[in-house]
Amino acid sequence: MDSTLDKVTKTDAEWRATLSPEAYRVTRKHGTERAGTHDDFPKEAGVFACVCCGQPLFDQAHKFESGTGWPSFWQPVDGVEGTAVGEQVDRSFFMRRTEVHCNRCDAHLGHVFPDGPPPTGLRYCINGVALIFKPEGA
């Protein structure tokens, strides 16, 4: 099954029932978790998927240490022009940023900034609570 084609929609009550309070606040209400909350992610090969719908989002091979306190990646699993992660303008907090979200269920993931490493020069700064890790071969 190609999960990029199967849109996931739930009521607010259904999201609340299936997510932790923090995951709900971040992914469904566009919150931000405290920096440094998720520095314990596995280092082995695998993918980071959406906590809400299981859509693969970021590959471990594209993760880097940004020093920001949030998991950072230089591209989504299907490349910068891919379909797993979508973008939209975020004008909250009197700033203009680019929000990233899961294209399958619209979960807020974090933001993307133009200060990342080669080859893309992008830094996808992602809330760790929005991700689940799936080891390679699992």
Image (cartoon, helix red, strand yellow):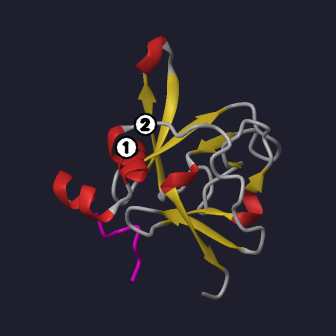
Report the quarter where the N terminus lies: bottom left
Quarter the C terminus occupies: bottom right
Residue shown at the point (47%, 57%) measured from the top left: 83
Q: Nearer the viewer, residue 75 or 41?
A: 41
Query: Does the residue at mark 2 contact the one at mark 1 (Cβ under 8 Å)?
Result: yes
The three-letter code of the residue at mark 2 reads Gly
How far apart marks 2 and 1 lie (CA) works out to: 6 Å
Q: Which residues are magenta?
A: 1-9
Q: Residue at x 61, y 50 (%)?
A: 80
Residue 130 position in % (x across, y down): 49, 54
Q: Which residue is mark 1?
A: 25
Instruction: Kindly identify which numbered label has been placed on residue 87.
Output: none
| Quarter of the figure with residue 5 | bottom left
* Amino acid type for the residue under numbered disc 1: Arg
Q: Which residue is mark 2?
A: 31
Q: Is residue 126 left or right of residue 121?
A: left
Is disc 1 surrounded by few (<14), some (14 to 19) or many (20+) residues within 10 Å? some
Residue, x 79% and y 51% (percent of image)?
Answer: 64
The residue shown at (65%, 79%) is 135
The quadrant in which residue 54 appears is bottom left
4 inside magenta stretch: yes
Q: Position of residue 81 (x, y in %)?
A: 56, 51
Residue 30 is covered by the magenta coloring? no
Is residue 9 visible to the viewer in this orientation of the structure? no
Q: Main secondary structure of the magenta part?
A: loop
| Secondary structure state at the residue bearing disc 2 | loop
For the residue pair 127 and 20, the one nearer the viewer reads as: 20
In the structure shown, which secondary structural element does the residue marked by tag 1 occupy? helix
Q: Using the image, determine if residue 85 lies above or below residue 124.
A: below
Of the pair 6 and 66, the residue shown nearer to us: 66
Q: Is residue 105 left or right of residue 94?
A: left
Q: Residues within 10 Å of mark 2 (few under 14, many from 20)?
A: some
